[in-house]
DNA sequence: AATGAATGAGGATTCATTCAT
DNA sequence: AATGAATGAATCCTCATTCAT
């Protein structure tokens, strides 16, 4: 009711803060319960803002979940990068260890993304499309690295190796989600990296 | 749609048949839309029985989905078996091809199961527990086969290989779900089998 | 399926036993939750017989609850009787103590009856009518006793005293239900009996 | 029924008014049909707001009925007050007449409360707890009045008299509910007041 | 930039009851 | 004398969303 004694400019900042609170809450709930389970009411209760405020920041529920995915992916990507040193296998292992660590530190992105990817709802929500796009991007990053590692391979072989690389990561992540502490993720990722390297070498050998 | 060719009036006194109709409908819907998306109303509409009849056959929604998982797994398990002939690698590949085929033929079990496995809700549904239990059973089947293949391994190594074997299958399944026809599942499973075999051999070599 | 080796006559007995099991269960549940809360499913679960069997023994839910009231009242009535010895006040107190004890021993009848009496549902169920009838009967028993105790009273005075006598019993029963162990029901009933006696005496004195 | 004389379109932005409409409807229905009989759909139909709006104002059905009890009790309490003039018995009778009148005017509170009090369900509704709490408050009001009336009594005696006073009121209310017009509530309450007064006097006399 | 209130559709589940066996 | 199965209506409650303020 009192007016004039609050700096108008703060608004922007508060708005951004609210948006963040909403995204935090939505991330937590969506990775607990998936798309359908992440109700606006639950997000509202967790972040303390009324449901109508969520609609001020996001067009609809789909928009909110897409934003969650987007932000999670940005955080995830910033956590690791391709190493450029060492021999072929060493570099492979180095990357794998980074991914393993990133998965342990920030599992939301992948958990939520996989949940969306596995669902086959009639009308595809934007959130799922966002995850698939983001994953394509990862693919684009991986492909040249493999080509660099084993120059003699055909495009189809590179594609297959990249697919296998990502599939292994997904599968190991799932194993960790199910198995909990009994799963030694770093060791498994090292094994995966070695297997990939061996496969690449074998492919090159076989084509000669 | 056609009318006249179904006996309108037997109804009542089927029991087992109704249960099966419900399970069929629930399987289809749940593997399309996950746990939360599989509403009782949807299942009821698809199987033709009123919602209240579903509750005669199943205690609640959770019980229904758990039954879906249980039945799907039994069907899936019966679709493949350990081969007993050939060299180690050949046998490995033979198993992998069977699994690939089973995944292509009846993906319901794994899709639904993985969706549940990824969720982390505060009170875990019995359906998820059922999937985890059933997966443990698959583990028990796999372990002796690996031990047979590479007799020199320690328990921990066998466990790690079995985990990696299943993780690869999960990951490749996810890849197929996302990538669709661009994914050559049999080729990837063959690659996975080879990688597994190589890893086992490498492990034995390193421990000597 | 086997036939001939069971005496046909047992049927009657089994039927009676089932009926009793149903009534026992219905009594317990109805005094816990009232008329609307006593669902057939709950009764079925408690007595172990399927819901359809309840409908074999009772026409409908209303009929079942009416039977519960009827049986409870018979049990309750058989638990006490008018004493014929002693002076006026002593007899009054003796009756009151019996009622107190009966209420403590078998509270179902009154609890359920009062619940029904307080409800004002549009269509009066038979069960409520049954309770009111049964209470009228108690009234008929009480009236001559009062007239005997204080012969000079008018009909209206006797009616008022009987009403007050029953109201006190009802109210003390409610107090016991709410207050639990902190309520000394025998002492309160003794007080009530004395109060009644005094009131009767005062009435006679005032009319002279 | 008449149409045209209500402004159709204000709606929204009332809040307190809606809450009141809901409480009014719930009070009427709950005192007719009890806790289980007061369905949200019935309340919704009577107050004109959709069921979901009821849940904006009240957490759940239990919360709604508890609020009904709370408000009814406040209204009921404000309808009478302790008189300060006259002799002991005159004051007692004056209070009793006020209570009788309040019961005749606004019986909702007590009817609904007694129904809840008589139920013994496994998980007690908050509404019942509210009634018991509110009744304790009435007790606290009554106790000093009795102590004032008969100063020589022990705590236990005062407690017993207060219990009997309330029990009588409850019982007479029930009698009125069942007996309808054949019950002269004011006369019975006067009798009850006299009985209470006599009992107090007798208690004091006996302890000397 | 935010929110209190509202709303209709739909969520899971239970209801009393029926009927063929 | 009993029961497995079914059924439509009703139960409480949550859903995503809107809108006036």
Image: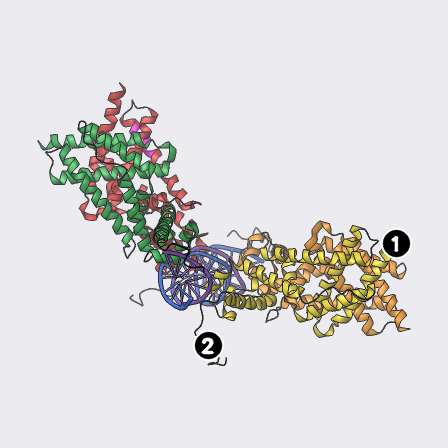
Chain colours: A green, B red, C orange, D yellow, E purple, F blue
Report the front residue among A128 and C11.
A128
Which callout, 1 or 2, points at the residue further toward the start of the chain?
A: 2
Give the structural element (helix, strand or loop) at label 1.
Answer: helix
Tally of numbered tags: 2
Residue A176 appears left or right of C33: left
Give the structural element (helix, strand or loop) at label 2.
Answer: loop
Same subunit, tags 1 and 2: yes
Where residue A70 sits: x, y (%)?
28, 48
Chain name for mark 1: D
Please name the predominant secondary structure of the magenta segment in the image: helix
Report the front residue among C65 and D83.
D83
User: Can see residue B8?
Assistant: yes
Q: Which span of residues is magenta-colored? A: B141-146
- Residue A89 to residue A173: above or below: above
Residue at 27% across / 35% down in the picture?
Answer: A99
Task: Point out the residue furthest to the left here.
Answer: A208
Task: Point out the residue furthest to the front here.
Answer: A4
**What is the CA distance from the residue labelled 1 to the residue labelled 2?**
68 Å
- Residue A113 to residue D86: above or below: above
Chain name for mark 2: D
User: Can see residue C9?
Assistant: no
Residue under numbered circle 2 = D7
Residue B160 appears left or right of C94: left
Mark 2, other Cα within 10 Å: few <14 / some 14–19 / many ≥20: few
Q: Is residue C49 magenta?
A: no
- Residue B168 to residue D26: above or below: above
Where residue B130 sits: x, y (%)?
40, 43
Residue under numbered circle 1 = D206
């Amino acid at each position: 009711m009192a007016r004039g004694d609050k700096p108008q400019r703060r608004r922007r900042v508060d708005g951004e803060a609210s948006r963040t609170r909403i995204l935090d809450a939505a991330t937590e709930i969506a990775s607990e319960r998936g798309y359908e389970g992440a109700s606006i009411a639950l997000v509202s209760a967790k972040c303390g803002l009324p449901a109508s405020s969520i609609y001020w920041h996001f067009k609809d529920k789909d928009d909110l979940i897409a934003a969650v995915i987007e932000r999670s992916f940005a955080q995830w990507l910033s956590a690791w990068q391709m190493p450029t040193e060492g021999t072929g296998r060493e570099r492979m292992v180095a990357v794998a260890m980074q991914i393993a660590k990133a998965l342990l530190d920030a599992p939301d992105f992948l958990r939520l993304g996989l949940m969306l990817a596995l669902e086959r709802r009639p009308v595809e929500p934007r959130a799922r499309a966002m995850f698939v796009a983001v994953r394509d991007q990862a693919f684009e990053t991986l492909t040249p690295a493999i080509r660099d590692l084993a120059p003699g391979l055909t495009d189809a072989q590179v594609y297959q190796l990249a697919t296998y690389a990502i599939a292994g990561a997904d599968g190991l992540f799932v194993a960790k989600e199910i198995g909990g502490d009994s799963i030694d993720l770093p060791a498994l990722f090292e094994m995966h990296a070695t297997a990939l390297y061996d496969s690449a070498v074998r492919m090159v050998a076989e084509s000669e």
